[in-house]
Amino acid sequence: FKKLDIDTKDQVHIATLKSLLKENQIVPSLVTETHGGYHVVLNSEKLTGVMQKNLHDFQLKKAFLDDGKERWMTIESNSMIAIPGTLQGGFPVRIVDDW
């Protein structure tokens, strides 16, 4: 599995990512909302080389915060996530069904 670590809740950024996933027919296995964003878990066995390249290119070229320096999305091979139902920084982590 791979995890997209999303460090924003900005709806423009999220819509851009959702559009990328839809265009590439990438269906998340699990999405959780965390204190500062989201964890999007992807089954790496279902990701073709083209899908992975498009995700990687997106991370390198488009996933920057407004300052242009910090990324709001990173692709991680460590798919550890905050457990739904627990608190993260006082925020109740939850599963997102409508991703």
Image (cartoon, rainbow, N blue to C red):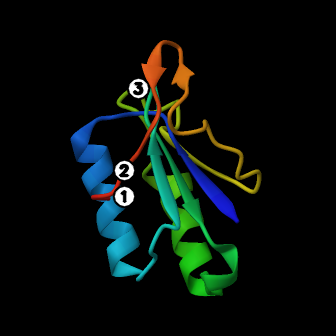
Amino acid at the residue labelled 1: Leu
To which quarter of the image does residue 82 belong?
top right
Residue furthest toward the top?
90
Q: Where is residue 52, by image quadrant?
A: bottom right
Closer to viewer: mark 1 or mark 3: 1
Q: What residue sits right under mark 3 in the picture?
A: 67
- Residue 86 spot, x, y in % from top left: 55, 28
Q: Amino acid at mark 2?
A: Val
Residues tagged 3 and 2 counted as in contact (Cβ below 8 A): no
**Which of the marked residues, 3 or 2, is nearer the chain's N terminus?**
3
The nearer-to-camera label among 2 and 1 is 2
**Dot 3: element:** loop
* Classed neighbour count for the residue bearing mark 3: other residues with Cα under 10 Å, few (<14), some (14–19), many (≥20): few
Q: Position of residue 81 (x, y in %)?
A: 64, 42
Q: In the image shown, does 89 or 37 lie closer to the viewer? A: 89
Q: Quadrant of the N terminus?
A: bottom right
- The residue at 31%/49% (across/down) is 14
Of labels 2 and 1, earlier in sequence is 1
Residue 6 horizontal/vertical position (percent): 48, 42
Q: Amino acid at mark 3?
A: Asp
The quarter of the image holding the C terminus is: bottom left
Residue 80 at x, y percent in the picture: 71, 45
Q: Residue at x 43, y 34 (%)?
A: 37
- Dots 1, 3 in contact, CB < 8 A: no
How far is mark 3 from mark 2, CA to CA? 28 Å
Q: Secondary structure at mark 2?
A: loop
Q: Residue furthest front?
A: 85
Picture disc at residue 69: none
- Residue corresponding to mark 1: 17
CB contact under 8 Å: marks 2 and 1 = no
Q: Which mark is residue 96?
A: 2
